[in-house]
Image (cartoon, rainbow, N blue to C red):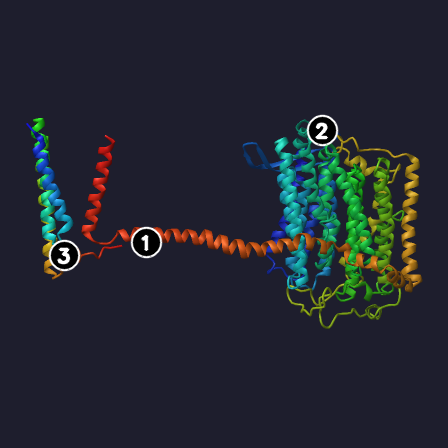
Amino acid sequence: MAIGWYLVVSALIFAIGAAGVLTRRSPLVVLLCLELMLNAANLALIAFARMHGDADGQIFAVIVMVVAACEVTVGLGLIVAIHRRRLPIDVDEMRELQG
Amino acid sequence: MTSRVELFGWLTLAFPLAGMMLVGLLHRRLPGRTPGYLATGAMALSFASAIGALISLQALGHEERQVRAVGWDYAKTVGIDAQISLLIDPLSVFMILVVAGVSTLIHLYSVAYLDSDRGFARFFAYLNFFVFSMLLLVLAGNFLLLIIGWAFVGAASYMLISFWYRRTTATGAGIKAFVINVVGDVGLVLGTYFIFRHVGTLDFLKTFEGAKEAFDPGSTDLTAGCILLLVGAFAKSAQVPLHTWLPDAMEGPTPVSALIHAATMVTAGVYLIARMHPLFELAPTAADVGAVVGCLTLLIAGTIAIAVTDLKRVIAYSTMSQIGYMVMAVSAGAYAAGLFHLMTHAFFKALLFMAAGSVIAAMAGNQNLDEMGGFRRAMPFTYGCMVIGGLALAGIPPFSGFFSKDEILLLIGDRGGWYWILYVAGYVGAFLTGIYTFRMIFRAFWGEPVPEARELEAGHLHHAEVHTNPANGEVEDTDVGFPGPEHHIAEREPAMKIAMGTLALLAIVGGLLQIPKVTHVIDHFLEPTFAESALYERHPSDGLITFGLLLGTLVGLAGIAIAYVVWVKKPDLAGSVRERLSGVHRVLVNKWYFDELINLLVVRPAQWFGAFAQQTFERLFVNGVLVGGATGLVRVGSSAVRAAQSGFLRYYAAMLVVGMVALTSYFLLLA
């Protein structure tokens, strides 16, 4: 089986996600792009698992999904909290932790 | 038996220490003269212990009379054997007898003399500490304790010289004494290092045993070490050119002068050379340096003493001169003679200082010889003591100084070679001694009585209405830190009389211990210490002895006669001689310009260097480059790092990506 194509798709999705994280200012979209990056990694994991013919990579991908779900929960919670306090929903505006 | 010697050795040290602590800690509780009597009692007990040490030491066999009393190991690590240990042998017992004995009398004298001073208890605490330090110095069984005692003596002298601490002249003199003594301390420590490096032990007896194997003949390290030890001895014993502190030390109370000059401190250098004699005999060059410097000192000090007009300074310069004899003697191998002179000198010099103190008290603190005169009838006892001390100092038979000084010169003359120069110089010095001693006596006690003397004859003791500093005329009060309001003269104080009477007796009979060809008490007593020495126990020929004794007598009498002619018979002569030799007189009054020379060579460059270091090095380099550079570096670095913490989330993410890409490409390229 040609793994190359799977990896190319995975890399493309990862790059799109990374570009989204770097360019978009809405935290919601940033979160979405993060998900994209995680799932690109998942795709690569599953492709490799398939290639080697064992289940380790698939289990790993499931764990990544769990982590991603947790992360989305926290991230969305934060966004809702920001929204409730009527703060601007913009990652560039939220920079009070600067040195 | 040995243990008893050790016990007495420790007790000799313990009593003054206990006295110091008692007086120092309880000074507020002790009324009146009790601190003085306590301190005197401590000294008397210490002297009794010294006698005990003497008796128990003499009970030992001749070969066993070198007892090491080890208290405990202070530091025993790789190659260092620093112990708290005493060496009790005839030399140290001789020294503690002289030190403790004369100090006891000086303590007794001070009880009366400083009676009205507000710092009475403080004075006696210092005095006991001083004697303790000196006893520690002479009893030390290794270099460690020697250095400790050496430094303690320097510190104690500082406290006592600047005892009247609100007199600027006194504090200045104290600082001067301390600084010059520290120069000596440095010499002593470095010299010890040079010797320790080769023999590998600090203990005296082991050092002397090992020195022969450890050093090649004519070893430069040993010579350097011995010369450095001599630097220490010169500073402590006020030998040229480290002597300038001694005359200034006259700013202290008179009993302090007596203590520094007679029993303690200045004799430390003589003791050091005598103690280190096995080393000096292996390094004859260093010994010769000591002999020459001693000889120079005795001449220079003798000439200055003729011109000085301060009563106590005349005696101070005479001390320098007499210590010069001793240093010359012990450096030239005449150990017993040098130590014999040390003992007789302790007697008559303490006596002279006490008598001078009595006169100064009668003058209400004034020390200027020009303003004194005619005290002969007003103060007969003081006068008698002064004359006895003066005759002993000038070396007139049968007073003690005659025998001791002439023995030194005899033994030096007996060594032949170039030592005859020292021999002749010694007699020139003796001639000067006769002149300056009796110049002082004639000017203070003969001639027309001054108002103070007349008052005293009528039964009143003069007390200055306004107290002034005799050194610079500054007005001062009689509160703490200044001399007390009352003055005490020997004629009215039994304590002073007892001290002076005892010393006068000793100054008369002390010489009988060792009359050439008749008695050899000191020679025999000290023999175990110097048993190894090739230079010990030489016997000059009868002709030399007779010649020396006659010459000594004649030279001393000639000096006195000249003093009589110049200052009594023809009082105008002194003035005309001074005018004719005004150049010489100026040099002598200015003490051969030693102070100016040291100022020019050492003090000024040091001050200049200090100013330079402060302005240039400290401000520009330390503050500017080191401190400023370090803070600048931190500031620049932190602002660069701070700039990275912008708070832009996307910027952080970009950094992350860049970092990941960089790392990945690095590993990819590597693979």
Image coordinates for residue B25, horizontal then vertical, percent: 58, 55
Q: Secondary structure at mark 2?
A: loop
Mark 1 crowdedness (10 Å alpha carbons): few <14, some 14-19, many ≥20? few
| Residue type marked 2 | Pro
The disc at residue B217 is 2
Q: Which residue is mark 1?
A: B639
Residue sitting at 42 percent across and 51 percent down?
B630
Residue B174 appears at what percent x and percent y? 66, 56
| In this rendering, position of residue B554 left or right of residue B78 | right
Q: Position of residue B22 (x, y in %)?
A: 61, 53
Q: Amino acid at mark 3?
A: Asp
Query: Marks 2/3: CA distance?
Result: 93 Å
Query: Is residue B571 among the parts visible in the rendering?
Result: yes
Quarter the C terminus of chain B occupies: top left
Tell which of A75 and B318 is nearer to you.
Answer: A75
**Secondary-structure class at tag 1:** helix
Element marked by disc 3: loop
Q: Nearer the viewer, mark 1 or mark 2?
A: 1
The answer to whether one can see residue B339 in this image is no
Q: Is residue B547 above or below residue B632?
A: above
Q: Are marks 1 and 2 in contact (CB under 8 Å)?
A: no
Estimate the x, y position of residue B134 in percent, counting from the top left: 68, 46
Q: Is residue A32 left or right of residue B351?
A: left
Q: Tell me where residue B471 sits by quadrant.
A: bottom right
Q: In which image quadrant can residue B36 be found? A: bottom right
Please name the residue that numbered disc 3 is placed on: A90
Image disc number at residue B17:
none
